Image (cartoon, grey):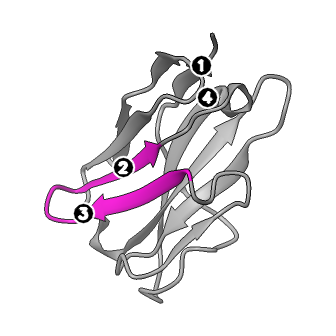
Amino acid sequence: QLQLVQSGGGLVQPGESLRLSCAATGFTIDDYAIAWFRAAPGEDRVGISCISSSGLVTNYKDFVRGRFIISRDNAKNTVDLQMNSLKPEDTAVYYCAAQKTTDSNMCLVPHYNYWGQGTQVTVSS
C-alpha cells in the first residue's frame, strides 16, 4: 500500500522554526516529484513548494520563498520541509504529496495522486 506518513508540526511562536517530514512507505520516491501544500483555516489547499525527482529543481510560492526549504533524501525515502521565520499567517494544515513523473526535473505538475495525512502547524504568540 502506497502511503505518505507525515511527522513534525506543532505550535511555535512567530520567528521560530519547524521541520516537517514526509516518509514514503510501500514505494520508493526515486521517480516521484514531491510537493507540500497547506490549507489555512477557511481557505482552499494551495501548493507552497515542490521538488523534482532528481532533486535538482525546486519551486516555491512567493510567500514562503527565502523562509522555507524543501529537500529530499531518496536513500531514506523522505522529503522534508524546513520552515524558518514562521509567521502567524503560516498557520495551516500542511500536506505532502507525491506524483510519478517522466521528467526528473519537473515538479510543477497539474495533479498529485498520493497524499499524506496532514499535520497542523500553528504560529502564535
Q: Residue at x 48, y 42 (%)?
A: 83
Work out whether residue 117 or residue 119 is closer to the camera in this orientation and state it.
119
Q: Nearer the viewer, mark 2 or mark 3?
A: 2
Q: In the image, which residues are magenta? A: 67-83
Q: CA distance from mark 2 to mark 4?
A: 15 Å
Task: Name which residue type carries label 3.
Answer: Thr
Q: CA distance from mark 1 to mark 3?
A: 30 Å
Label 1 near label 4: C-beta < 8 Å?
A: no
Residue 86: where, in percent of width, then height? Answer: 58, 34
Tag 1's secondary structure? strand
Q: Could you tell me which secondary element the residue under label 2 belongs to?
A: strand
Rendering quarter of residue 55: bottom left
Return the disc, 2 or 3, that comes first in the chain's sequence: 3
Quadrant in the picture for the C terminus: top right
Left or right position of 13 against 28: right
Q: Are marks 4 and 3 in contact (CB under 8 Å)?
A: no
- Other residues around mark 1 within 10 Å, as few (<14) / some (14–19) / many (≥20): many
Labelled disc at residue 93: 4
Where is mark 3, residue-wise?
28
Going by the numbered disc 1, the residue's amino acid type is Thr
Lower position in the chain sequence, tag 4 or tag 3: 3
Vertical side of 74 occupied by 102: above or below: below
Most extreme residue toward the left is 75
User: Mark 2 to mark 1: distance in Å?
Assistant: 18 Å
Q: Nearer the viewer, mark 4 or mark 1?
A: 1
How far apart are labels 4 and 1 at the CA level?
A: 9 Å
Between the residue at mark 2 and the residue at mark 3, the CA separation in whole angstroms equals 15 Å
Name the secondary structure under disc 3: loop
Q: Which label sits on residue 80?
A: 2
